[in-house]
Amino acid sequence: MKAVAKLKSVPMSARKMRLVVNNIRGKSVEEALDILRFTKKEAATWLEKVVLSAIANWEYKLDGMESADDYDLYISEAFSDEGTQLKRFRPAPHGRAHRIRKRTNHVTIVVENRIPLDSETEGEDVVEEVETSEAPLED
């Protein structure tokens, strides 16, 4: 089962964010959080927020009955896209003006479990029982 968390309009360039996003892609959730806590870049604080939100979304999908620790969650997808730009002007020499682009980005994290859920395997067992329990009709 997958759960998605998105954080939009983060006030930092997507290129700077991707440096940290590439470090956590494919890692287990615990390992990713450890990496983010000890990374000195500003992007790590924003990403930690998104990863924790993705874990909470995954638990919410199960109506809070299960804990995420039991199912070996990992980050299956992680990417950072460019957002809108705020365009400003700064005075330059000789009466000119230089444009300043204040960039933003959108971060998306998808969390998935490696250990299958009990309800997923139960549903498969029920299908198998129905198929095998049919007896041939006698005329």
Image: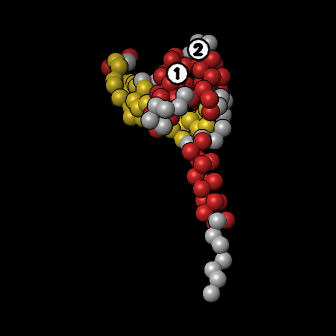
Q: Please tell me which residue is depicted at 35% across the width and 29% down the height of the picture.
A: 87
Q: Quadrant of residue 83?
A: top left
Reply above or below: 27 against 34.
below
Q: Position of residue 61 (x, y in %)?
A: 46, 38
Reply above or below: 90 against 114.
above
Q: Quadrant of residue 135?
A: bottom right
Q: Which residue is mark 1?
A: 48
Q: Please tell me which residue is depicted at 64% across the width and 83% down the height of the picture.
A: 138
**Secondary structure beneath label 2:** helix
- The residue positioned farthest toward the bottom in the image shown: 139
- The residue positioned farthest toward the front in the image shown: 139
Q: Which residue is mark 2?
A: 37
Q: Please tell me which residue is depicted at 64% across the width and 31% down the height of the picture.
A: 72
Q: Position of residue 43 (x, y in %)?
A: 52, 21
Q: Quadrant of residue 38?
A: top right
Q: CA distance from mark 2 to mark 1?
A: 8 Å
Q: Amino acid at mark 2?
A: Arg
Q: Choose between 4 and 70: the one closer to the eye.
A: 70
Q: Position of residue 66 (x, y in %)?
A: 53, 31
Instruction: Of the two numbered discs 2 and 1 on the same chain, state the one appearing first in sequence.
Output: 2
Q: Quadrant of the C terminus?
A: bottom right
Label 1 Cα neighbours within 10 Å, binned few <14 / some 14-19 / many ≥20: some
> Do the residues under discs 2 and 1 have CB atoms within 8 angstroms?
yes
